[in-house]
Image: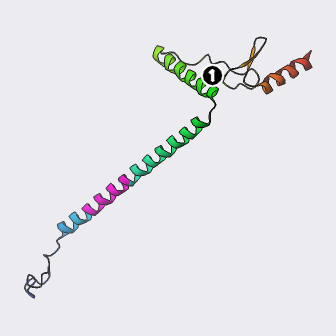
Amino acid sequence: MVDHPDKYDYSRAKVPGPLTKEMEAKKLEKKRAQKAQRKQREQAQREQQQRWEQEQEKKQWFAALSDREKRALAAERRLAAQLQDTGTTLTNISRCWQCGESLVGRIPFHYLDFSFCSTACLQTHRRAQAGRT
């Protein structure tokens, strides 16, 4: 139609107008924009799905905790919030004397001036101390 505008009766044949370079560029740009929007929408859906799955995992994890662990977790969160409000950090976290595990949120086992995360660490420490004497 661009090369031979008078050769045929294009309006009678209901042929749409010729595509110019600008029209083709606009059409291509529109397709690219739609593709970018689709990708962005799919990415947002994937992120939302991942957040939902993580929330479900957290719910299952929390439901599996014992009442004692739930209370300890709540106390740990209150402590962290209180420390955040005062502007201090948890630099003085007590740790297991044997393995170095953090005792925050746990009820430690005490022996003399030592604190341990589990009875296994306590027993290992006692055996090591007995072997030194």
Residue at horizontal 64 percent and vertical 25 percent from the top: 68
Residue 115: x, y in percent?
73, 17
Residue at horizontal 85 percent and vertical 19 percent from the top: 126
**Residue farthest to the bottom, as pictured:** 7
Characterize the local packing of mark 1: few (<14), some (14-19) or many (20 or more) Cα atoms within 10 angstroms: some
Q: Quadrant of the C terminus?
A: top right
Residue 79: x, y in percent?
54, 18
Residue 35 in magenta stretch: yes
Residue at horizontal 88 percent and vertical 22 percent from the top: 127
The residue indicated by pointer 1 is: 104
Residue 50: x, y in percent?
48, 47
82 to 9, vertically: above or below: above
Q: Quadrant of residue 2?
A: bottom left
Magenta stretch secondary structure, dominant: helix
70 to 86, vertically: above or below: below
The boundaries of the magenta stretch are 30-41
Residue at horizontal 55 percent and vertical 24 percent from the top: 74
Q: Quadrant of residue 22?
A: bottom left
- Front in this rendered view, residue 21 or 128: 128
Q: Quadrant of the N terminus?
A: bottom left
Counting labels gives 1
Mark 1 residue type: Val
